[in-house]
Image: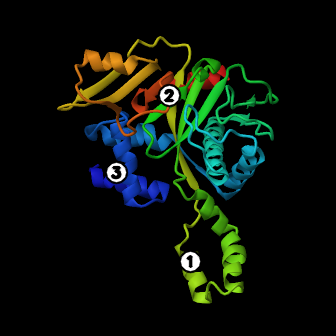
Amino acid sequence: MTREEIIQKVSSHLSTDVVEAEMIIDKAIIGGETTEEELESWLNNRFLPNVVFIDEDGYARMCIDALKIVGTTAASDYGSSRQRDLGQLWADMTRGYIGELAFKIFLKQNEIDIELGHEAGELSEYLPNDIHKVKKDKEEFREPKIKVGIKATKWNGIWFDIPGDQFNHSDFHVLVKVGTGRDHLFAYFKKISVFKDKVLKVGQDIGLLSGDEANTLYNNLPTFKPISAYIAGFVKKDEKYDDLPYKGKSGRLNYKITEWNGQIKPGDLEIIKDKEKVKGKIAFEGIGSFAHDSGYLFNTGNLKWGKKDWKEVMEGL
């Protein structure tokens, strides 16, 4: 298959435009999941088998579950003083829950049922064990035998960033790329007529909008569609990771880190700067820098994703 044919196949499978499809492919290459020459193999063996879809009902459930806890969740990002407003926090929490639901669907396709246990009062966006109950074959729901943390990122994510001591609190860490974009809440609100029957109607009632203007605004809003999600892979806590597990490339002055596979500690970047004789700055591919310098970090190309890899997780549950 040519690159153009692969882009078209991704676009068709995800019901998205070719621009987003090409971005997804480019990020897979940049993240180290594949190369330009191996795109067809990546598509058929890694990407398509690990894509699931969340329908309107599933989205509504995750949206409401997130709303239950959004008021008790810290508004600041981990390791940062940046404050998210309530709407952004709700959207971020919903995306995270959609990532968990996507993994639930993925396991269901492999004849394993789980309960996510979203309850009001849970504060964390990333719990040590996002799987609260598991059911295999004819058994009843029970406590899982291992702890699995699930984290969601957008389609353009190429890094699995596990800050602080979170890595040691779960046995396996799963990364899910979710096709929510920036407008998923708006698309859902349009679907359930929040804008047409409420917001835009008020605009007409108070004389700010004509009927034609209201219709134009409504038609320009994003349209809800089933949300695609890609189970990108996982990492294990019980694995040997090397010190300074990086790869990168030097520029004239600066140095770009393209791969990382393990722990990142305070002072690591200074060591790399000295080791690589960098005169300028060190930056991570695609993101520049992270809000912290302590935890575990993986590019998506270093995640485990094959059938034998997933078998270990599924049998462990």
Q: Quadrant of residue 226?
A: bottom right
Measure the alpha-carbon separation of dots 2 and 1.
Answer: 41 Å
- For marks 1 and 3, the one nearer the N-term is 3
Element marked by disc 1: helix
Please provide percent x and percent y for residue 128: 67, 25
Numbered disc 2: secondary structure? loop
- 2 vs 1, front mark: 2
Image side of residue 260 versus residue 206, left or right: left
- Would you name the residue on which mark 2 appears? 292
Give the labeled residue for mark 3: 6
Left/right placement of residue 136 relative to residue 211 reads right
Location of the C terminus by quadrant is: top right
What label sits on residue 116 in the rendered view?
Answer: none
Q: How far apart are marks 2 and 3 (CA)?
A: 37 Å
Within-10-Å neighbours for mark 2: few <14, some 14–19, many 20+: some
x then y, percent, for residue 107: 63, 36
